[in-house]
Image: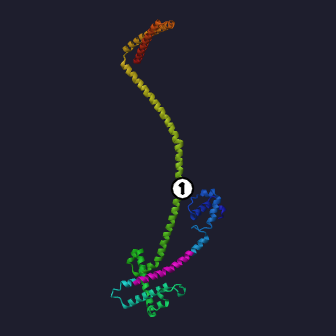
C-alpha cells in the first residue's frame, strides 16, 4: 500500500492505526486523528517502514540480532565449561566428605587424588600466564616448567580421564533427574528409563513454557498499553463531564436559585401580611370582647360632648387671639390676657388628649 493511501477512509486508516499501536509508544492516536492529519500519517508510515517493533531502525536491529547470536554462542561455551568445573568440584567435595568412610577403595582414592592434583596444577599454570607476556617476575620465581613437573603420570591421567567421563555423566544424570522431579514431582516414582525419556523432552517442554511466559508477558504489556489508553480516555471523559456539570451549575442551578429566592421572598411577604392581618384581627377581637354596645354608645356620647367642648374652646381661643392681637400693645392688661389665653390653651390640649385616648380605647 502506498503512503498516500494511508489517509483514505476505510481499511487503510485502520491498518495505519494498528501499525501505530504496534510499533510506536502509546500516543493515544485515534482513526479520527489520522484522518485529520494526513501529512503526519504519511510521516508515521515512512517511519514504520524503517523501524521494527522494538523501535530500532532495521540496520541496528540486524546488528543487535547478530550480537545476541554471538553472545548466546559464547554463553553456551562458558556454561559448558562452568558446569564441568562445578561437577568436578562437587566430586572432590564428596570425596573429602567420604574420607572417613573405610569402605573407600584404593582406586577411588587414586582417582580423586589424581583429579585434584591435575586440577590444581592446571589452575596454577593458568594463573602464571604466558612467560613472554609477563612484565613482572613470576610468583615465588616459579615457571610453568616447574609446575608441569607436578603433573600426575600420563598413565594415571589417561585412566582418570576415562573414569571422569563416567563420573560426570552420572552426576549430570542425577542433576537432570533432580530437575525433572522439581518440574514434575509425579516423575519421582518413575523408572530410570521413563525418567530418561522425559529428560530428553524436558528441554522442549521448558522452551515451550518459556515461550508461553513470553507470550503472556507480551499480552500483559499490550493490556497495559490498552489500559493506559483507556485511562487517558477515561480522564478526558471525566474532564468533559466536570465541564458539563460546571456549565449546568452556572446556567441552570444559579438561574433556578434566583427564581427560587424570588418565590421565597414573595411567600415571606405574603406570610408577613397574613401575620399582620391576624394580629389586627386578634386586636379587634380583644376590643370587641372588652367593649360592649352600651359602652361604645356611652363613649360615643362622651366623645361628642368632648368634641363640642373642644370646638367651644377653639372658638374662645380664636376670640382670645383676636383680643390678644388687638391689645398686644397694652402692658399689665396684656399680661392678664396672655395668662387667660394660656389657661384656655392648656384646657383645650387636655380635652384633646382625653379625646384621643377615648378614640384609642374605642378602636
Q: Is residue 194 visible?
A: no
Q: Is residue 35 visible?
A: yes
**Residue 253 screen position, x and y as percent:** 51, 41
**Residue 225 screen position, x and y as percent:** 53, 62
Q: Is 76 covered by the magenta stretch?
A: yes
Q: Residue at x 37, y 14 (%)?
A: 295
Query: Residue 73 versus residue 143: which sits nearer the camera?
Result: 143
Q: Residue at x 48, y 79 (%)?
A: 79
**Residue 134 screen position, x and y as percent:** 53, 85
**Mark 1 crowd level (few <14, some 14–19, many ≥20, 10 Å Cα):** few
Query: Residue 227 versus residue 84: which sits nearer the camera?
Result: 84
Q: Is 267 covered by the magenta stretch?
A: no
Secondary structure at badge 1 equals: helix
Quadrant of image for the C terminus: top left
Quadrant of image for the N terminus: bottom right
Query: Residue 218 versus residue 162: which sits nearer the camera?
Result: 162
Query: Residue 95 versus residue 259: which sits nearer the camera?
Result: 95
Q: Say which residue label 1 marks.
A: 233
Q: Which residues are magenta?
A: 67-92
**Residue 184 screen position, x and y as percent:** 41, 74
Q: Quadrant of residue 152?
A: bottom left
Q: Main secondary structure of the magenta part?
A: helix
Q: Is residue 26 left or right of residue 121?
A: right
| 348 shown above or below 265 | above
Amino acid at each position: 500500500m502506498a503512503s498516500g493511501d494511508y489517509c483514505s477512509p476505510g481499511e487503510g486508516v485502520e491498518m495505519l492505526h494498528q501499525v501505530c499501536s504496534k510499533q510506536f509508544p502509546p500516543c493515544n492516536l485515534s482513526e479520527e486523528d489520522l484522518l485529520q492529519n494526513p501529512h503526519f500519517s504519511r510521516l508515521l508510515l515512512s517511519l514504520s517502514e524503517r523501524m521494527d517493533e522494538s523501535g530500532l531502525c532495521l540496520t541496528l536491529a540486524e546488528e543487535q540480532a547478530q550480537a545476541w547470536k554471538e553472545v548466546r554462542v559464547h554463553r553456551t561455551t562458558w556454561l559448558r565449561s562452568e558446569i564441568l568445573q562445578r561437577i568436578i568440584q562437587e566430586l572432590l567435595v564428596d570425596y573429602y566428605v567420604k574420607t572417613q568412610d573405610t569402605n573407600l577403595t584404593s582406586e577411588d582414592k587414586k582417582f580423586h587424588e589424581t583429579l585434584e592434583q591435575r586440577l590444581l596444577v592446571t589452575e596454577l599454570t593458568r594463573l602464571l600466564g604466558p612467560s613472554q607476556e609477563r612484565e613482572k617476575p613470576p610468583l615465588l620465581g616459579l615457571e610453568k616448567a616447574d609446575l608441569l613437573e607436578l603433573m600426575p603420570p600420563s598413565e594415571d591421567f589417561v585412566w582418570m580421564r576415562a573414569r571422569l567421563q563416567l563420573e560426570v555423566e552420572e552426576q549430570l544424570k542425577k542433576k537432570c533427574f533432580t530437575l525433572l522431579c522439581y518440574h514434575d514431582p509425579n516423575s519421582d516414582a518413575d523408572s530410570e528409563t521413563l525418567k530418561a525419556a522425559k529428560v530428553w523432552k524436558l528441554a522442549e517442554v521448558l522452551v515451550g513454557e518459556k515461550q508461553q511466559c513470553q507470550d503472556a508477558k507480551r499480552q500483559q504489556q499490550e493490556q497495559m498499553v490498552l489500559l493506559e489508553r483507556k485511562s487517558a480516555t477515561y480522564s478526558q471523559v471525566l474532564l468533559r463531564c466536570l465541564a458539563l456539570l460546571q456549565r449546568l451549575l452556572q446556567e441552570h442551578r444559579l438561574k433556578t436559585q434566583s427564581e427560587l429566592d424570588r418565590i421565597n421572598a414573595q411567600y415571606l411577604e405574603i406570610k408577613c401580611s397574613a401575620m399582620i392581618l391576624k394580629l389586627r384581627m386578634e386586636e379587634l377581637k380583644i376590643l370587641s370582647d372588652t367593649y360592649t354596645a352600651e359602652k361604645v354608645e356611652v363613649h360615643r356620647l362622651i366623645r361628642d360632648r368632648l368634641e363640642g367642648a373642644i370646638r367651644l374652646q377653639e372658638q374662645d381661643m380664636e376670640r382670645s387671639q383676636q383680643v390678644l392681637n388687638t391689645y398686644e400693645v397694652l402692658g399689665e392688661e396684656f399680661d392678664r390676657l396672655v395668662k387667660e389665653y394660656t389657661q384656655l390653651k392648656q384646657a383645650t390640649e387636655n380635652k384633646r388628649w382625653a379625646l384621643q385616648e377615648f378614640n384609642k380605647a374605642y378602636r
